[in-house]
């Protein structure tokens, strides 16, 4: 279970201070993931890696450890052109992001 209070303590912020960051993170992550999916079809290793790396960096800043772990693995696959492995992991990645987003939405409502 993702803990917004824990993240806030680690970042020396109040949970309310993170709300806007989360509101920007999820749409940005979705856009970058769409870019990755499109570029997988084009066998564009550089843009796939760039998109995965961008999401990973944002997720790491927000201490989304499970998501970061998945993205690290996928980034390695992108480096070696293993796009089929990435495609097979995309549903789980999307589910992880959805789950985090739901937890954040519940917390702030």
Image (cartoon, helix red, strand yellow):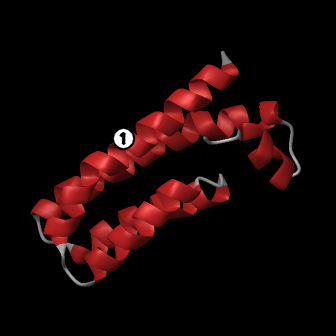
Residue 38: give x, y in percent of width and height: 18, 55
**Farthest residue, direction front:** 1
Task: For residue 13, say whether it is visible.
Answer: yes
Mark 1 element type: helix
Looking at the rendered image, the quarter that the N terminus falls into is top right
In the image, 83 versus 47, the foreground residue is: 83
Residue hosting label 1: 95
Task: For residue 11, say whether it is visible.
Answer: no
Category of crowding for the residue at label 1, using alpha-carbon neighbours closer than 10 angstroms: few (below 14), some (14–19), many (at least 20)? few
Relative to 47, 20 lies left or right: right
In the image, 93 versus 45, the foreground residue is: 93
Vertical arrangement, residue 92 with respect to residue 107, above or below: below
Q: Quadrant of residue 39?
A: bottom left
Please give the name of the residue rendered at 59% of the width and 53% of the height, measured from the top-left corner. Answer: 64
Please give the name of the residue rendered at 37% of the width and 52% of the height, measured from the top-left corner. Answer: 32
Relative to 65, 83 lies left or right: left
Residue 62: give x, y in percent of width and height: 65, 52
Vertical arrangement, residue 36 with respect to residue 48, above or below: above
Residue 28: give x, y in percent of width and height: 46, 45
In the image, 105 versus 20, the foreground residue is: 105
Please give the name of the residue rendered at 29% of the width and 82% of the height, measured from the top-left corner. Answer: 79
Relative to 36, 73 lies left or right: right
Vertical arrangement, residue 9 with respect to residue 101, above or below: below
Vertical arrangement, residue 36 with respect to residue 79, above or below: above
**Farthest residue, direction bottom:** 80
Q: Quadrant of residue 108?
A: top right
Q: Quadrant of residue 10?
A: bottom right
Relative to 56, 80 lies left or right: left
């Amino acid at each position: 279970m993702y803990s917004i209070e824990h993240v806030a303590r680690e970042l020396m912020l109040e949970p309310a201070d993170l709300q806007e960051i989360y509101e920007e993170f999820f749409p940005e992550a979705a856009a970058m993931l769409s870019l990755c999916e499109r570029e997988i079809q084009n066998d564009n290793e550089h843009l796939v890696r760039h998109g995965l790396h961008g999401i990973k960096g944002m997720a790491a800043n927000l201490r989304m450890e499970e998501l970061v772990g998945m993205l690290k693995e996928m980034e390695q696959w992108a480096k070696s052109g293993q796009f089929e492995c990435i495609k097979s992991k995309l549903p789980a990645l999307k589910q992880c992001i959805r789950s985090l987003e739901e937890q954040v939405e519940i917390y702030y409502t």
